[in-house]
Image (cartoon, rainbow, N blue to C red):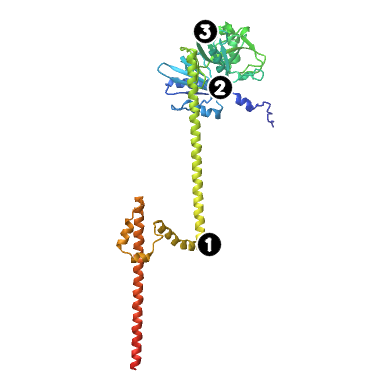
Amino acid sequence: MGHSRKKKRTHVVPTEEEIAKTPRSLVVKSGEVGPSVSRLVRDVRRVMEPFTASSLKERKNNRVKDYVSISSHLGISHLLLFSQTESGTNLRIGRVPRGPTLYFKVNSYALATDCLHLQKSPSTSNIVFKTSPLIILNNFAGEDKGKELKLMTAMLQNMFPAINPSAMHLSDARRVVLFNYNDATGMVDFRHYNITVKPVGVTKGVKRVIMAKDVPSLAGFDDISEYVLREAFASESDVEDGPENSVTLSEDYFGRVNRKNDQRAVRLKELGPRMELCLMKVQGGLCDGDVLYHNYLSKTKEEIAADARKRQINLTNQARRRQEQEANVKRKNKDKKDADGSGESDSDNDEDEDGDGRGGNMDDSDDEIAAVAEKPKKVRLAADDFGADSFDPNEASDSSDGSIDGAAGGEDEDGDVEMEERKPSKRAKTSSKSSSDKKTKTKTKEKNKGKGKEKIKTKSRSGSKRK
């Protein structure tokens, strides 16, 4: 019975610091673009794998701020935006979230499918896209080069993960991305290759035997020597595979016969796409900010200072408006909380009042009696306000209309006060008259009752005498 295989390979899990330092990119299209530009975006995403969003589905109305808002959550460090206008195709490469931004014009491009169709025996595999590519920057250094090229060099170099040769495995080197600067035209050529190795010092037939998965057919040959010697001549690629172009493998490389310490020739097969880029301008921020470089326009120091002042004023105004908005939001939230708290307190008071009424305490009854007792005092105070504090109802019953007119006809220095005094005197007089009438009616009723009693007494006396 067989034994289980012992696992000798170990997978080193990257630390959080390494993950945080690894650059990640978003390759998107902005606005309405044609089908060819959409395929170009997919090809560039393929180049930036595995640290990119390969299956991202953007919308036409997405803006730069939408991508910036999710960049912090996903660890995005670079943003590549393709757009299309009437003049051509444009590419913006920006560092998230604060810039700078490089503006390129895509003079010409070829898709990955076009590059593969040009090859006699194209070969692609998804395995090569599981590791990040190596980056080569050619002809970017030099004292005569401007500052814009130094900035472009740093930007392009930081788009891809850094390489540690001492800790890197040879099998991780599968692809190469090449940026070549042309001094004559000022263009930047972009290429994408796949790395392959082949044996050195053998004929083409032997290479086929060694590298082929199946044994070649020898039906048309009498001897194997005929098969080997028939293709003994060297091709152009074999001539290039000299000692100066060969390397010694330090580790086992992917393939059938690529073992450690073997001599192998390095070959590059183009995967695509191709692009020819022209740097138009450089901005300090992410798609905004100071124009650090422009290919066609140049400004004086005074114009640059004026633009800086204008931009500073705009920034201060934005900060002031932001503070005002935050203050308004805080004030509204505070008012809302106060309103909610006052409503709760009012409801609590109402509940307390209802509970006291149901209990029927003696203190509440005493308070009600005191309030009823104070009511005549309030009426008296109201009469005093109308000037009826010195009014006597007996005098009012004996007085005539002429006395009222005489009292009303008195003139004071202030005419307004006279009109105010007339009305309370009339009201007091009418109230006195009504009270005097009630008194006379009660007196007459009492007299009538007394007379009736006297009649009954006289009748009873006369009856007793008759008896």
Could you tell which of marks 2 and 3 lies nearer the N-terminus? 2
Q: Which mark is residue 363?
A: 1
Q: Which mark is residue 460?
A: none
Residue 287 seen in render: no
Instruction: Return the x and y of residue 143 as percentages of the image width and height.
Output: 57, 8
Q: Secondary structure at mark 1?
A: helix
What separation in Å lies between label 2 and label 3 (alpha carbons)? 32 Å
Q: The residue under label 2 is which amino acid type?
A: Phe
Q: Quarter of the image holding residue 401?
A: bottom left
Q: Secondary structure at mark 3?
A: loop
Q: Which residue is mark 3?
A: 183
Q: The residue under label 3 is which amino acid type?
A: Asp
| In-image side of 466 versus 150 (left or right) | left
393 vs 176, nearest the viewer = 393
| In-image side of 90 versus 207 (left or right) | left
Q: Which residue is mark 2?
A: 129
Quadrant of image for the C terminus: bottom left
What separation in Å lies between label 1 and label 3 (alpha carbons)? 104 Å
Camera-nearest label, 1 or 3: 1
Camera-nearest label, 2 or 1: 1
420 vs 59, nearest the viewer = 420
